[in-house]
Image: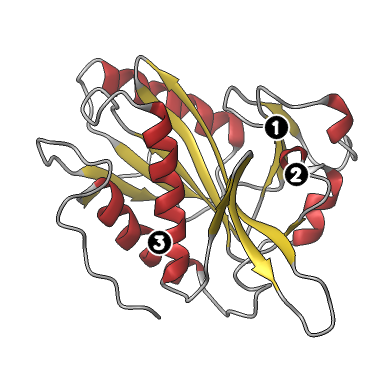
Amino acid sequence: MLDHVLNPAPIFGRPDGLAAGWAISRGPVGYLEAVAAMEARAAAIAAGEAPELIWLLEHPPLYTAGVSSKAGDLLAPDRFPVFESGRGGQYTYHGPGQRVAYVMLDLTKRGRDVRAFVASLEAWIVGALGHFNVEGEIREGRVGVWVERRAPGLPTREDKIAAIGVKLRRWVSFHGISLNVEPDLGHFDGIVPCGQTQYGVTSLVDLGLPVTMDEADAALKASFIEVFGPVTPAEAPL
């Protein structure tokens, strides 16, 4: 692991220094139930009735279609349930072994800069991967975080290890990120992930790293604090 020094001035922190809630659901959470809980929490945050929340969970196997999805990118429509999603992006897969982090932050308290917010989400994932000596990279025109795969005698290829898809309502974010820890990568074959046909998908375990979900959560938490500021334990909505 790499040793990280906490940044005294988070990239996308709150000037008032208030901590966001950090909650983890231990069992699988249904997609529609999660979306309903997110929307309710985002509305409460916008109304000043609830604090910010980062909610970590796993879904049962499913596909979601973002607002930019194309019908032809759903290759196996009968394989898993398919849900229309209000988040940005195209088709993606969620399932066991993938850490989904739903991010409900009040951007009125952090600066109303959507571009900076997305860049901060990218920095969060890159920082978390750094805890495992994995060099996550950002590519112009491709949302998410990528890793280069090199093998003797073979051309270098790029695989996606984390996806980003967010939505804002009244300047409160919801939906968020997904990090592939140890999902069944074959489940991505039922879609064109994020509309990208020339790139693959990978995970921490696929890279040869025996990372547990708890270890991934610890790295995500440490990196989140560096980028967004302090967190405090919170109860998961479901």
Residue at 23 percent across and 27 percent down: it is: 50
Mark 3 touches mark 1? (CB < 8 Å): no
Where is 175 relative to 222, above or below?
A: above
Give the total number of marks visible in the rendering: 3
> For the view shown, which residue lies furthest in the left direction?
16
Of labels 3 and 1, earlier in sequence is 1
Residue at 77 percent across and 43 percent down: it is: 196
Other-residue count near label 2 (Cα within 10 Å), few / some / many at <14 / 14–19 / ≥20? many
- Residue annotated with mark 1: 90
Please give left or right for residue 112 compared with residue 37 in the image: left
- Residue annotated with mark 3: 127
Q: Quadrant of the C terminus?
A: top left
Separation of disc 3 and disc 1 at Cα?
25 Å
Helix, strand or loop for disc 2: helix
User: As shown in the figure, which amino acid type bears the numbered disc 1?
Assistant: Gln
Separation of disc 2 and disc 3 at Cα?
23 Å
Mark 1 touches mark 2? (CB < 8 Å): yes
- Residue annotated with mark 2: 193
Which numbered dot is residue 139? Answer: none
Please give left or right for residue 211 compared with residue 5 in the image: right
Considering depth in this image, is 216 or 235 the residue closer to the camera?
A: 216
Residue 206 found in image quarter: bottom right
Helix, strand or loop for disc 1: loop
Please give left or right for residue 219 compared with residue 192 in the image: left
- Residue 215 shows in the view: yes
Considering depth in this image, is 70 or 64 the residue closer to the camera?
A: 70
User: As shown in the figure, which amino acid type bears the numbered disc 3?
Assistant: Gly
Considering depth in this image, is 40 or 13 the residue closer to the camera?
A: 13
Residue at 27 percent across and 41 percent down: it is: 12
Where is 26 relative to 236, above or below?
A: below
Of labels 2 and 3, earlier in sequence is 3
